[in-house]
Amino acid sequence: MVIASQTTHFELTLEKAELEGFRADLRGKLLRPGEEGYDSSRRIFNAMIDRHPALIVKCACVSDVIKAVNFARKHDLLVSVKGGGHNVAGNAVCDGGMMIDLTNMKSIRVDPRNRTARAEPGVTWGEFDIETQAFGLATTGGQVSTTGIAGFTLGGGHGWLMGLYGRACDNMVSADVVTADGRLLVASPVENQDLYWGLRGGGGNFGIVTSFEFALHPISRVLGGILVHPLERAKQIIGLFKELGDNGPPELGLMTVLTTLVDGKRVAILEPCYAGSIEAGERLLVQARRFGPPELDLVKEMSYVDFQKLMDLYAPWGMHHYWKSGFLENLSDGAMDVIVEFAKSAPSNLSQIHLERHHHKACTIDPSETAFFHRGGGRVMYNLMIISSWRDPSESEVNLEWTRRFWESIRPFMSERVYVNFLSQEGDERVRAAYGGNYARLVALKRKYDPTNFFRMNQNIRP
């Protein structure tokens, strides 16, 4: 029996009886090109990624994951793994091989007494937050609620609560992992400690996590929202962002966004999230709310769940995306000038420039404690994201060219540090930079748990 990929002319030859036996043995579904659900399953957040797996396994349970891994290994299939499908690089989908789709694995169990939650890899942060907030608890999650918990956490995972509680990977208490040889292992501080270390920042290189256990913290209401200024005031807003960022407390999550409103007006947005007492947050943000003053002030007390959805409007599925990102060496006047210049010339009204504050707990953990290396030595770090987005594929070249020119202009102000979850397909050098000083240790771990590089559709650590 021959299964052909539509784009690569790849042909997978399998005995029909064996393939149908595999299908019958799954609790979930096996999808092939042309079958109902195949196209919707292979689509992901970034519309630039248009790949066609020969087989898609829609897993319903852990046994499905194990069976998929064993089948793929037996037939020497390229494997990709889809959790939330939000990663811009598109590694969730392969051409010609097997995509292991975890999006239907959505169980969440909260233990309010021990302040932990266990969740399966198809869960998104929006779904996770709703469950944990029923008990007034939360952990550091993605800044877009449709982001999946799996890839986000495995790559490090930064969000609004990282100043208080560290990154998502710092809050991962344990994980159940299916390895390349089809074993199900527990990774925790007391079991397979080396694997536990590697999963917290090493991406999907070591296996498929089928269950995450997170530490939770008391969070309910926050003071947050957006302060909107005209783009002409952008440099002053970035300066205010830096002043607040350099001196603000761990409770203050902070971001600056340069973008375009739906009416076509280009703006500079300051977005705070204060996760302490509302009264203390009000006092802290007096300066920011008076500065300018803003043309629109939408900062108010709200639930953490509602705040976590604020960025969703700026991250719709189905757009074409090309991102460049890295940590600034210094948020200097020169860097600000470059950022503002390119904000004015963005060819797409859907594109955005983000400046994010990484601070306090996220930056004070020893770089060797987890696989996530870039901690800042206790210093505040500023991450720049160039999010180039557009709808019409005919506009790809002009948007790609703008992004590349922007990146080359800002590079003199950048450090070598880069967040692995924001990497596109940028080559081995950038992958090594993402893992930093932990790279050699990660290579040794890869040799132990995946010596054949079975899991290679990722920001790959080669054994």
Image: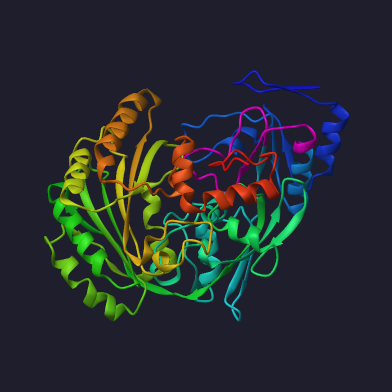
- Is there any visible trace of residue 414 in the rendered image? yes
Q: Which residues are magenta?
A: 72-98
Q: Nearer the viewer, residue 335 or 80?
A: 335
- Image point 48% across, 57% down: which residue? 157
- Examine the residues drawn in magenta and state their main secondary structure: loop
Query: Is the N terminus in the top left, top right, bottom left or bottom right quadrant?
Result: top right
Q: Residue at x 39, y 49 (%)?
A: 417
Q: Position of residue 436 (x, y in %)?
A: 46, 50
Residue 227 at what x, y percent from top left? 22, 60
Q: Quadrant of the C terminus?
A: top right
Asked if the stretch drawn in magenta spans residue 87, the answer is yes
Residue 185 among those drawn in magenta: no
Locate residue 180 relative to residue 166 in the image: left or right.
right
Image quarter of residue 80 = top right
Residue farthest top in this picture: 9
Is any part of residue 103 visible from this angle?
A: no
Q: Is 15 left or right of 186, judged from the image as shown? A: right
User: Which of 40/325 is in front?
Assistant: 325
Residue at 78% x, 48% y is: 27
Quadrant in the rendering for residue 221: bottom left
Give whichever of 173, 107 is nearer the camera. Answer: 173
Percent from the top left, x then y, of residue 75? 78, 32
Does residue 245 appear to the left or right of 317 in the view shown? left
Tell me where residue 224 appears, x and y as whole percent.
31, 66
Q: Quadrant of residue 95?
A: top right
